[in-house]
Image: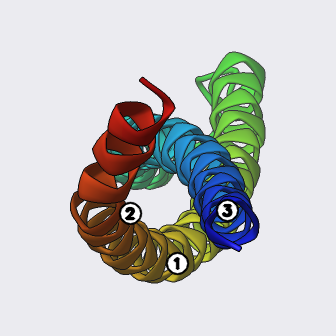
Amino acid sequence: MRAGKQERKTEKIEELQKDYNEISKQLAGAEEKLNYLCKSQTEKENLIEQKQKEITEIETEIENRTKRHEELLASREEIESAHAQEFDFSSLEEKVEQLKEDLELKQDESSQLSEEVEEAKLELNEVEQTISRNSSRMEDFSASLQDITVEIEALEKQYSGVSQELANERD
């Protein structure tokens, strides 16, 4: 009868050990995923920061070119009014047209970068949500793992005396 009882206790310990090992594997996997997501979040934040700097530079460039364009237009008007028939404005008009094209390109580029920043922010938000969910799951796994460890230790203490008694009886 003791042997059957001992066998059941051993099976229970083995089952608890199996559960413990499974939870440990899940915890390790969740921790690895969390580390990856944290790294990904940092990379996304750096990318957003870089894109925002690029946007700021492009906006500054657009502002400078717009001012230059206005100056050229004002200069052209002054020259035209003062010496309307004496000058060939084709080169100035070409410069103005080129500046307009450059301005449009920079505005398009700025819009595109703004969209990329918004997309990166959305991705970052998703990563943060996933990290939050995984952190919660890791806490749950950790608590379960701690409970199982305490239960195994209690069972080992409880049955360590039984094992010694059985060994003594066999002798």
Residue 136 in the image: x percent, y percent? 43, 83
Q: Earlier in the sequence, mark 1 or mark 3?
A: 3
The Cα–Cα distance between marks 2 and 1, rounded to whole angstroms, is 22 Å
Residue 133 in the image: x percent, y percent? 54, 81
Q: In the rendered view, tell whether residue 161 sits above or below residue 2.
A: above
Q: In the rendered view, tell whether residue 16 sits above or below residue 91.
A: below
Q: Is residue 101 visible?
A: yes
Q: Earlier in the sequence, mark 3 or mark 2?
A: 3
Quarter occupied by residue 13: bottom right
Amino acid marked by disc 1? Arg
Q: Quick one: 114 or 57, which is closer to the camera?
A: 114
Amino acid marked by disc 3? Asp
Q: Which mark is residue 152?
A: 2
For image coordinates 63% across by 34% down, the residue present is 99
Q: Secondary structure at mark 3?
A: helix
Quarter of the figure with the C terminus: top left
